[in-house]
Amino acid sequence: MRHLTLITLGLLTLCLARAATGAASDDRPVEDASKAGLVKKERAELPTLWVIGDSTVRVGTNGQRGWGDELRPFFDTAKINIVNRAIGGRSSRTFLTDGRWDAILKELRPGDVVIMQFGHNDAGPINEKPPRDSKTRARGTIRGNGDETVFVEKNIITGKPETVHSYGWYIRNYVATAKSKGAIPVVCSPVPRKSWDSESASAKINRASGSYGLWARQAAEQSGALFVDLNEIIARGYEKLGRAAIEPFFADKGTHTTREGAAFNARAVVSGLNSFKDDNPLAAYLSEDGGKVPAFVP
């Protein structure tokens, strides 16, 4: 296992964070967990679809909506619980270190499904104050899917020592621990931002296919999880609709969605699930609308 120093990795992270295509670090304040509310199972006897991730999946800002809160119309909630435990400001690292994943593990049952999407906050500082922001940040992960680590003697937020891993390592950890409970993990690449590669009529949405989208795919394949290339599915959808048509999908400069945009992204998740055909672990729980969503064709 390769071990990196905090100084070396901190500089590397700051240099590359802004270059991360489709998964730029969100500079807003980290959402207060005590104010986010905890979504619970509606019926204990039913299987549960757990959704974990960052603010693009569930957000507490007025006028914004995450795709995890728009999944219900695509499922028969008389057959399955939909529990969205995503929270704004978390990375694949801090969703774990905050204890949020451990709390879910205590409730996981065999046959439950866990859909995860991280990446938007993983490009942030490991344990530093970014020069463009007065807020402290300690949520970044090592870029990639390797086994290298960096040791932080004192986390500036928790005050405790911490060994930080790669983005891919954290994804693989979620997959492994979900499987240990008999649950079925589904890894999603992060949703794309409203970022076009040019001003031309033939412009394309910038992908994360060389960064977090790639690492999410690699981690899923290595750990035996299903993979939904949400980054690609949504990017293609945006390009088909065109620049003007997707403007109402966003509640800010191009990261967080309105209800309309969140519904579009939730439909993309279902499209990815339907592409698994007979291997779709949620096929039996789809609503009529969910069953009609065309499967994504790579």
Image (cartoon, rainbow, N blue to C red):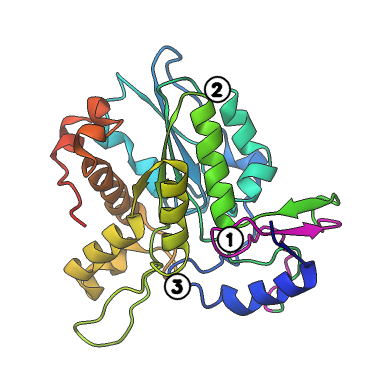
Label 1, label 2: how many angstroms apart (C-alpha)?
A: 26 Å
Q: Earlier in the sequence, mark 1 or mark 3?
A: 3
Q: Which residue is the site of mark 1?
A: 122
Q: Earlier in the sequence, mark 2 or mark 3?
A: 3
Q: Indicate the quadrant where residue 153 lies.
A: bottom right
The residue at the point 45 percent across, 72 percent down is 21
Taking the image as shown, residue 118 lies to the left or right of residue 123, namely left
Q: Estimate how packed mark 1 is, as few (under 14), some (14 to 19) or many (20 or more) residues with alpha carbons within 10 Å.
A: many
The residue nearer to you, when weighing 26 against 99, is 99
- The answer to whether mark 2 and mark 3 are in CB contact below 8 A is no
The residue nearer to you, when weighing 128 against 181, is 181
- Counting from the top left corner in percent of width and height, residue 269 is at 31, 47
Instruction: Establish if 180 lies above or below 52.
Output: above
Q: Quadrant of the N terminus?
A: bottom right
- Counting from the top left corner in percent of width and height, residue 213 is at 42, 61
Q: Which residue is the site of mark 3?
A: 21
Question: Which structural element holds mark 1?
Answer: loop
Residue 63 shows up from this direction = no
Give the residue type that dot 2 points to.
Answer: Glu
